[in-house]
């Protein structure tokens, strides 16, 4: 299972603090090799690199993402290595952190990693997403 661990402080017996791992994600995620998302923000559209995706959401990194947690967001999602495009997907930013990502010819750069939870997807988007995540399952028309 591909997962991201959330860290929370917990006081230990000696009076200091230690870190405890807790699982934040409910679903398995597929690591995306070549994927981008375009955030359709009112000011300046932003582009991010998709890290992974699941039936409920995805995570991405981008240079600037000033939207706070719990903000609604509209985006386009393109997964190039699977030839999939999802236009105008609605979601909510549920997690945000600062990471360093290796950028060609620049070295490590400070980036923002965001987790997005999908709002209900359209039927055709849900079907395409399931075919990406579960290629071995036979999805018939009765679904």
Image (spheres, rainbow, N blue to C red):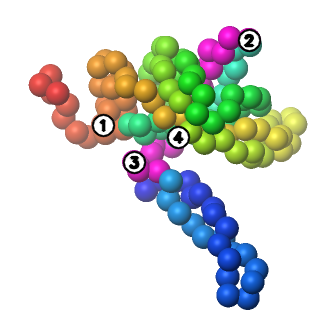
CA distance separating discs 1 and 2: 38 Å
Q: Earlier in the sequence, mark 2 or mark 3?
A: 3
* Residue 54 percent coordinates (x, y): 43, 39
What numbered label is drawn on residue 43?
Answer: 2
Q: Residue at x 45, y 45 (%)?
A: 29
Label 3 or label 4, whichever comes before in sequence order? 3
> If you read the primary sequence from the N terminus, does the residue marked by circle 1 or circle 2 appear first?
2
110, above or below 88, in the image: below
Say which residue appears at 67% left-offset and 87% top-offset.
13
Q: Is 38 included in the stretch rendered in magenta?
A: yes
Tell me what residue is drawn at x 75 percent, y 45 percent. Answer: 98
Question: Residue 32: where, in percent of width, then height?
Answer: 52, 38
Which numbered disc, 2 or 3, marks the residue closer to the eye?
2
Q: Which mark is residue 52?
A: 4
Near mark 1 (Cα within 10 A), the count class, few <14, some 14-19 or many ≥20, is few
Which residue is more in the foreground, 137 or 142?
Answer: 142
| Mark in the foreground, 3 or 1 | 3
Q: Earlier in the sequence, mark 4 or mark 1?
A: 4
Secondary element at tag 1: loop
Provide residue 5's location: percent of width, then percent of height. Answer: 57, 58
Mark 3 secondary-structure assignment: loop
Which residue in the protein does label 1 denote?
135
Q: Are marks 2 and 3 in contact (CB under 8 Å)?
A: no
Which of label 1 and label 2 is nearer to you?
A: 2
């Amino acid at each position: 299972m591909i997962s991201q661990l959330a860290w929370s402080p917990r006081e230990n017996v000696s009076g200091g603090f230690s870190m405890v791992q807790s699982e934040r994600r409910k679903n398995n995620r597929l690591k995306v090799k070549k994927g981008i998302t375009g955030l359709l923000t009112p000011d300046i559209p932003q582009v991010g690199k998709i890290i992974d995706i699941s039936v409920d959401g995805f995570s991405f990194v981008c240079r600037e993402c000033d939207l706070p947690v719990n903000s609604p967001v509209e985006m386009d999602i393109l997964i190039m290595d699977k030839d999939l495009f999802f236009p105008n997907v609605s979601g909510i930013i549920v997690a945000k952190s600062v990471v360093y990502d290796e950028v060609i010819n620049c070295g490590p750069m400070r980036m923002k990693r965001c987790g997005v939870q999908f709002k209900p997807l359209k039927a055709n988007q849900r079907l395409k997403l399931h075919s990406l995540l579960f290629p071995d399952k036979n999805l018939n028309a009765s679904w």
